[in-house]
Image (tube, rainbow, N blue to C red):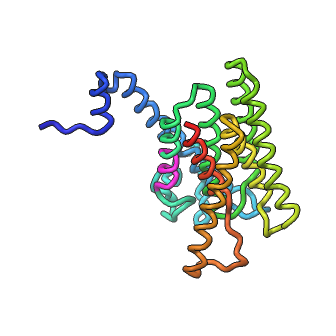
Amino acid sequence: MALTGPAEGLDRAEGGSAGAGSPAGSRRWSGRLAVLTVTPLLRLAAIRYAVPPGRPERTGCDGCAAPIGLDRPRPALGPAARCGGCGARIGPPPGAVELAALAALGLLVLTGPPPVELAATAWWLGWAVPLVFVDLAVHRLPDRLTWPAAAGTWLLLGLAALAGADPAPWLRATGAGLGLAAFFATSTLLLGRRGFGLGDAKLALGAGALPGWYGWGLPVVGLLLAVTASGLVAAALLVARRVRWSSHLPFGPYLVLGTVGALLLAG
């Protein structure tokens, strides 16, 4: 009795083939190759910018100063996340960036937007993945990552509007991104450290624009999902006595998760 995986069985049920030469097989292989190609770059960004404010970008191992860069492929940029010189762990946990990239690919497959909208979503996710790990590590969202994420998303959605000859979704996305960013920036100005950070406001430019493309309500849904998730995690950490009431927790990862949830609802 031959055993087939779910994807292969589905292809056969639809009269297709899951082989590498079929359209479905080609899409899966191209997606996997894209993940393998981009994950060292994502891990490099997470390593380079996960430094406290005012510190220079990390260019080598903290232990032995072995250089880390795409021009010199080293184990530090692979799933093992270990320095090739001294063996010390560098950056995000082993396999974490790779799993995040696969999850991002899964989101693109599940939502399946038109090509230009797909490019805008993929662009934003490509910057959001290292931003999540940087925020978790040092509680900051550097401009070197947030501004390109927002600008590229805005431009690609603009191209999607031109391709569809309808500016309304792009104008709505622009308004939603600016509105969500203004909300975060206002909380920072009014509440200081008790509010959100300006990095969250810059991340919100893209986090509001992407779901805003599909409707005014979705950015609000994404924000509610983010606030709910962060509240539940904070409550659990308080009960476990891992943090105190005065502790400052990063919000960027929850904003990314909330945006992903809103995009899944849009799809």
- Given residues 202 and 58, the one toward you in this image is 202
Residue beneath the point at 46% across and 34% down: 31
Q: Is residue 233 left or right of residue 96?
A: right
Q: Residue at x 76, y 55 (%)?
A: 199
Q: Nearer the viewer, residue 102 or 2?
A: 2
Q: Percent position (x, y) of residue 117? A: 62, 30
Q: Quadrant of the N terminus?
A: top left
Q: Main secondary structure of the magenta part?
A: helix
Residue 101 is covered by the magenta coloring: yes
Task: Give the residues drawn in magenta, as a range.
Answer: 95-102
- Asked whether 256 or 176 is in front, the reply is 176
Q: Quadrant of residue 228?
A: bottom right
Identity of the residue furthest to the right in this view: 189
Q: Quadrant of the C terminus?
A: top right
Q: Residue at the spot x=65%, y=49% of the render?
A: 221
Q: Where residue 220 sits in the image (x, y, percent)?
A: 70, 49
Instruction: Identify the residue at horizontal 70%, vertical 30% (top origin).
Output: 157
Specify the farthest residue to the front: 217
Q: Is residue 118 left or right of residue 247?
A: left
Q: Quadrant of residue 166?
A: top right
